[in-house]
Amino acid sequence: MGTQSSNPPLLSVGVPPFDLLRVPIIGSFLRWRHSRTVLQIPLLVVAVVMILHGLLGPALAPKNLATVLSWVHFRGALVLVLLCAGNFFCLACPFMLVRNVARRVFRPRFNWPQALRNKWISVAFFVAILFTYELFDLWSSPWWTASLAVGYFVAVLIVDGFFKHASFCKFLCPIGQFNFIASTLSPLEVAVRDRAVCDRCATKDCIRGRRETLYEHRSPAAGSPVIGAAPGLVILQRGCELALFQPRKVGNMDCTFCLDCVHACPHDNVGVTSRLPAAELMVDPIRSGIGYFSHRKDIAALAIVFSFGALLNAFGMVSPVYALEAWLGKLLSVNHEAPVLGIIFAVFLLAEPAVLLGVAAWLTRALGGSKRALVPLAVRYSYALVPLGFGMWLAHYGFHFLTGILTIVPVTQAALASVGIHLLGAAQWTWTGLPIHVVRPMELGFISLGFAGSLFVVHHLAEEDCATQPMRAFIPWAAVCLFIGLASVWLMFQPMEMRATLMGG
């Protein structure tokens, strides 16, 4: 089958999909046009408190809200919400609340440059975040963590202050890109309920926004508006800022769950519905605002960095990495960590993916008889690694979150005590979280789930690509998944640093 397949996403057939917006109370709240703002306000307050405590509070990371909330709780909660629901953290993003307020004063004038409408810059930012996290030990520095958050706010205000729509979210934000690629595995997506309703719709408000034309002129005598003269266009509710036209939208890629399309649709025809996780990775229809996955090398690069970056990020906190860095430093006769880290990053994010995906693509052509060239094959099958990469992110971030889930209590107590508010007595520093022997099976479960998901996607792609002998196309990519899966399990059983966490005693 050709790359430009028009197959719809795979669905769980037999019953109507679950729709979160039909759930009492929750659905009514989310359909309320101010629901996003209500969710953003508390997260903005938390962000401000984190920044202040990071800049002015204790320098010890396990006792500072900036490091504990950022590197223990936020990351763990993020991946678990993506696994169980969808991209709801982008929905409640506090950066966008500040941007929306700023846009009431400063209106952006420019469109994002055509040549930069891709993921390459955001992929570079993603790698840069991973690199600086290790180089500057961000997990151990409240000041640098708070400064990074301040830098994020400034970047959002500058970019979206000059450029229209959600340019920062779609083309630059590394957290957003992580959420976009991870949410391809989420069980919920923003989608139309009935395509026939969209076919009859003449206004396309979900993408254009809901508008109303007013006719008025001012009375020369009183200066009051009078209906019936020069037209003026008023936008009552904006449409999708990420250029996702709902009837042609496929999956969660580039969707921030902002629900602007829900509020703009005059027919109440957009919901937050259930679907088969990873279904959008198995098909290659043209996607609104994106195009064909098989043609997007930049999104494939994002999937590769997401998948192999999960291994790299975990490798950076186990004991073998220090022996490797010492050996490389001695070999290169350097004392600074940056060049050594650069080599490790190049191996994990460039050399290793190039070798594994290149060999698998060559074997797919040689054994399976695929007619695709090597690069298109590598691009297409790279999306199959996303479930396994997400499994590793879940295992890693879930480990810190679950073993340190209660640490927020004593850190908050100490922060309040520092300003004269004594809550529930002295800080309970013995409160940590679940014991490691309880969390370890969960880690293995996450990795196994990701491995199974990747094999499922690979098998579907192999059947589509080599219909006559799919197993010959399946085996090379299954071997790549097995290699990554075994490496993930090995990493999970290495001595791991309890970053930004005090161990109770």
Image (cartoon, rainbow, N blue to C red):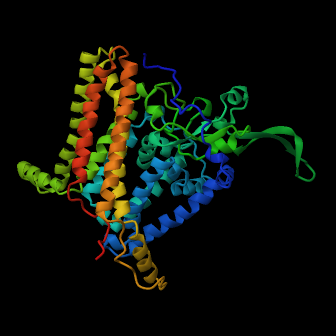
Does residue 400 appear to the left or right of 95 in the view shown? left
In the image, 227 versus 71, the foreground residue is 71
Q: In the rendered view of the protein, which quadrant contains the N terminus?
A: top left
In the image, 234 versus 351, the foreground residue is 351
Q: Is residue 441 above or below residue 454?
A: below
x and y, in percent, of residue 261 in the image: 64, 41
Is residue 350 visible in the rendered image? The answer is no
x and y, in percent, of residue 284 in the image: 46, 25
Q: Residue at x 23, y 42 (%)?
A: 486
x and y, in percent, of residue 303 in the image: 36, 37
Q: Is residue 44 above or below residue 308?
A: below
Q: Quadrant of residue 238?
A: top right
Does residue 32 appear to the left or right of 431 in the view shown? right
Does residue 10 appear to the left or right of 124 in the view shown? right
Is residue 391 visible in the rendered image? The answer is yes
Does residue 268 appear to the left or right of 188 in the view shown? right
Q: In the rendered view of the protein, which quadrant contains the C terminus?
A: bottom left
